Image (cartoon, rainbow, N blue to C red):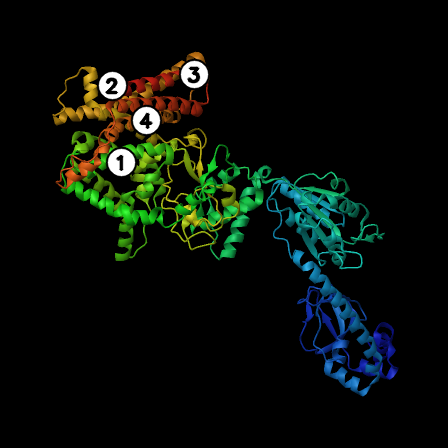
Amino acid sequence: MSLTNLVTWLRERTAFSVLSEEVIEAIAQVMSEKIVSADEILVKEDTPVKNLYILAKGKLESDRTSQTSNAWAISWLPGAIIHLQELLFNQPVQRTIFSRSECRLWVIPGAKFQELSEKYPEIIQKFAPELAKELAQLSSQLSYEQDRQVILRPYLVTKARRGIVGKSRYAVRLRQKIKQASGDRQSVLIFGEPGLGKDNIAALIHFGSPYRREPIIKLDCSKIQASGAELFGRVGGKPGLIAALDRGTLVLNNIQELDKELLSPIAELLKTKTYKPVSRSGENVKPIESQARIIMISEKKIPEIDPHAERLLKVPPLRVRKSDIADQMAYYLSLISRAKGIKKPRITPEAVRQLQAYDFPNNLSELENLIQRAIVQAAGAKELTEEIVWPSQSKKKQFRVNLLNNYPRLRHFLRSPWWPDRLNYGFTLTAFAIVVALLFLGPQTRDKNFALNLFWAWWWPLVLIGFPFVGRLWCAICPFMIYGEITQKLSLWLVPRQLKKWPRQTAEKWGGWFLFGLFSLILLWEELWDLENTAYLSACLLLLITAGAMIFSAIFERRFWCRYLCPIGGMNGMFAKLSMTELRAQQGTCSAECTTYQCYKGGPQKGEGMATNGCPLYSHPAQLQDNRDCVLCMTCLKACPHRSVEFNLRPPGIELWTSHQPRSYEVALLLLLLDAVFLHRLPEIQSQLGLSLDLSNFWTHFGVAIAALSLPAIFPMLVHLVMKGYYQLTNKIKPKRFLELAYGYLPLVLAANLAHYLKLGLGEGGRILPVSFATFGLNGESLPVLVAHPAVVAFLQGTTLIAGVITSMWVTQRIARQSFKLLLPQYLGIVVLAATFWQIIVGW
């Protein structure tokens, strides 16, 4: 372009037209042409001004990225002079400038333009007042924007958290609806179940619209003042949020919780796009037009509001989008792994299938928290299995009373150092050593050895009586595991190393059969070598179980022996199912709030949660289906910062017909303990059957003991076969499996074992004082003795058996959930067994 044409263009197209011909010609002489590509940054804010630019062709935009105010945003069109203000007032670059299309610019070096300004004072005289006015306007606008930001800041939504994940038709349709809603300014009502991220969908609509640069605020309707002053402002007072929002987006979250007094003003706002500031009573107020877009979020229909919403957007629950669960899980895994700086674990197909079978009442929020919990619980594992990825099952809380809430002192005691650590290491540890020493060194018969009397006449009856009340409580103060823990700590101190992880699959498959076999051997040993009346052999039995706990504690982490291999623990876990108490956790709290899972993993103090090493049996209280794997050590209660753990009073044995999972080795142990009653009563059986077997002969005694430990267990199996035949004759439906119905005998088995040991407890337990003196060679014949009359013992034994029969019938009925007539064979089997027990225990 020639100099003449350039001068003409500057005079006709730019603000330099106010200058004289001489000045314009001088400016034109120092100009050079520059081409800038699309989407290129021309200059950055807060940098020294190098050039004056005049846009000849194309489109430029500018903004101050360090500010949120829209006052700095400018679009430049051809003829615009850029950086004139900065050069005249010696300022740095005020805005970052970038090209929206290919641009042709005229460039004047900054130093040259300043020389021209000094040479021609006319430039400053003409432009300085105009620029000063612009600066004043900008300052006023920035002040307004600053006040506006102060009002809106507590409610601002800065970004959408995520898009809509998934490929199902529901996800595709939801994305389409969001896109449609983003294209206009109509009011929107988003409704659906809790946990669907409806507020995030509102953010997606706003940030996908042409007004994305305007602010978006979210208000919780349950917290809005009943007067509405916060929203609408007051006459002659502080402006409300709607006024400050201008053309932004107002999100009313949980509109179903809006105060009834505000329903009418909000409906009017939706219908007429106007509102009235709050005024004094009787004051006439002119309506104000609102420029804001309204998006409402609700979990249910609101008759006063819904008809006025211009667009409805229903969010489908996760239970109808099961095909999206895998994609949603992968998204959360990537998000959480990236935030934690760990490698993304793989989730097994079995775990995905388990979650797809769950309905997720809390939808996406529950799934996200579940994945977060699983990652924490996995502790760096390469994959998440179905054992770790467990959903929050919505269990009924009927017939349960949380004793920790009703009795705060009980909660305080169970969270104190006294339970169980001080009790264990201050008393049980020493007492057990003394008992074992007395069994080895003291007199060898029960009538003269305090420890032997304590073990057989006190411990066995008390622990059996305790099962219906406190379940597996004995395991919390068990001396076997105390010595196991000490061995574990000492071995790690002497030989620092990493203890082995539990071989869970192998232990679940074979551990129960191991303890069944060990229990069988113990019963045979007890019978054939008369452990009840031989002190040193009873000590050997205690040391044998203690040795198992110590050996496996030195190899595996936590209490592997207690959970899978201990014969006493196996019996305790089975009978604990009948308990009227249980330790559980509020699954909704664990699933929605907990992120550390210290009750399971252990960890430092958090809130009211104490520092612990985690559950010794690797059980999460929210995962417990029965009492089998809870030793009531209360580690989870101490570790939980959310007060989620409960110690409930419940109907005895309720888990047997609700959440129970039958196990074959557990049924085998149940039948073994049924056989054990017959084994303990061999002399009575001989007398009843008129046999004259020489039980003093080892092999004869051994053969009879084997028969006693095997033949009675056949009877319940025969009863089940009869019942199957009975079903075929009377009904087309099949009975439940023997594996399930066998648990109906559990109360009777417990009652029979208790009835057997009541004779020892009531007949010999009260002799503890003279026996204690006799242990140390003293004469205690004058000391008080408290023993029950044989008739009282017989009455209590009979009462126990009757209670066992009634409870067994009731449990069988609840497990089978069939008519009395169809279950008649098993009821008759229970009565026959009870009559047999009566005959050999109580006598006629």
Q: Which residue is mark 1?
A: 459
Mark 2 residue crowding within 10 angstroms, few (<14) / some (14–19) / many (20+): few
Residue 782 occupies quadrant: top left
CA–CA distance between discs 3 and 1? 40 Å
Give whichever of 361, 378 is nearer the camera.
361
Position of 590 compared to 774: left or right? right
SS label for mark 4: helix
SS label for mark 3: loop
Q: Residue at x 21, y 20 (%)?
A: 685
Q: Position of residue 799 (x, y in %)?
A: 33, 23
Q: Position of residue 631 (x, y in %)?
A: 36, 41
Residue 822 is marked as 3
Tell which circle, 1 or 2, labels the residue nearer the N-terminal end.
1
Residue 714 occupies quadrant: top left
Q: Position of residue 444 (x, y in %)?
A: 14, 36
Q: Nearer the viewer, mark 3 or mark 4?
A: 4
SS label for mark 2: loop
Tell which circle, 2 or 3, labels the residue nearer the N-terminal end.
3
Q: Which residue is mark 4?
A: 751
Tell which circle, 4 or 1, labels the residue nearer the N-terminal end.
1
Q: Position of residue 787 (x, y in %)?
A: 24, 29
Q: Amino acid at mark 2?
A: Gly
Q: Nearer the viewer, mark 2 or mark 4?
A: 2
CA–CA distance between discs 4 and 1? 16 Å
Q: Residue at x 74, y 53 (%)?
A: 229
Q: Amino acid at mark 4?
A: Ala
Res 736 seen here = no
Q: Amino acid at mark 1?
A: Trp
Position of 818 compared to 68: left or right? left
